[in-house]
Amino acid sequence: MEFFLDYWNRIYASFFMNFIQENRYLVILNGLKITITLSICAIGLGLVLACLTNFFRRSRWRPVRGLATAYVDVIRGTPMVVQLMIIYFVILPSSFSNFTAGVIAFGLNSGAYAAEIIRAGIESVDRGQTEAGRSLGLSARDTMIYIVFPQAIKNILPALANEFIVLIKETSIVGYIGMVDLAKAGDIIRSRTYAPYMPLIGVAIIYYIIVKTLTVLLARFERRLKRMDQRDNKTV
């Protein structure tokens, strides 16, 4: 009994020193704010780039199609941390902030993966739907916008939500360009308290809570989509 009591006291003392003393929890909260803001901005940019990429892939101009394909291939074929450092240290001028560089880097990366998700979702729609739209006199663009894409959304949204979850975890590397995100905040606390475990465990728990919450919400959303499909099938 004394052993467990002593063990608990040591855990509490470590927790107090790393997160409560000198208001170090504020470092974690600020890092969490940056992580969430960066993730939301990056996924927004990624969705825009994904839609443009799929539009360019269907262009009649071969150079445009080739450029869109090369963008996806290069981004998917190189590590995220390398992309981040190239954009910040090589491509962008020094006047750009590290937050802007992070949004651009993660937006480009997310856009390439989201483009593949959207492409797969569009291709999952029966080709007869496209033919039916064209037979009604709709143009290829209108057929895509009003017939194909609305049907593809049900297949696309869950996968895009998973991409958002992955993106949140990937932002933990922004410390390479000097951003104090959630992961970097834990590292800063560890450098001040010299505690090897508690800051890392605390950061890991916060990441887990965020991901678990989004996963549960995604599961509920997918179940709702399935119920909607079942009602539509019964109506038909």
Image: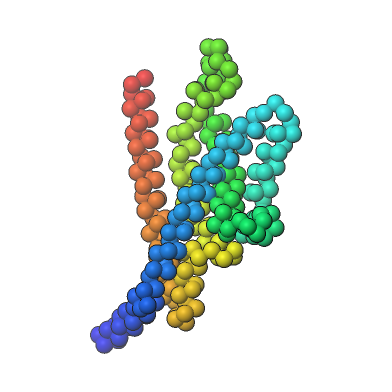
The residue most toward the bottom is: 2
**Residue 138 drawn at (x, y percent):** 55, 15
In the image, 180: left or right of 215? right
Vertical relation: 152 (above or below) 28: above
Residue 200 occupies which quadrant of the picture?
bottom left
Residue 219 occupies which quadrant of the picture?
top left
**Residue 169 drawn at (x, y percent):** 49, 57
Vertical relation: 165 (above or below) 147: below
Q: Residue at x 60, y 52 (%)?
A: 105
Q: Residue at x 65, y 33 (%)?
A: 57
Q: Residue at x 61, y 56 (%)?
A: 96
The residue most toward the right is: 63
**Residue 59 drawn at (x, y percent):** 67, 28
Front position in the image: 222 or 64: 64
In the image, 95: left or right of 41? right
Vertical relation: 184 (above or below) 230: below
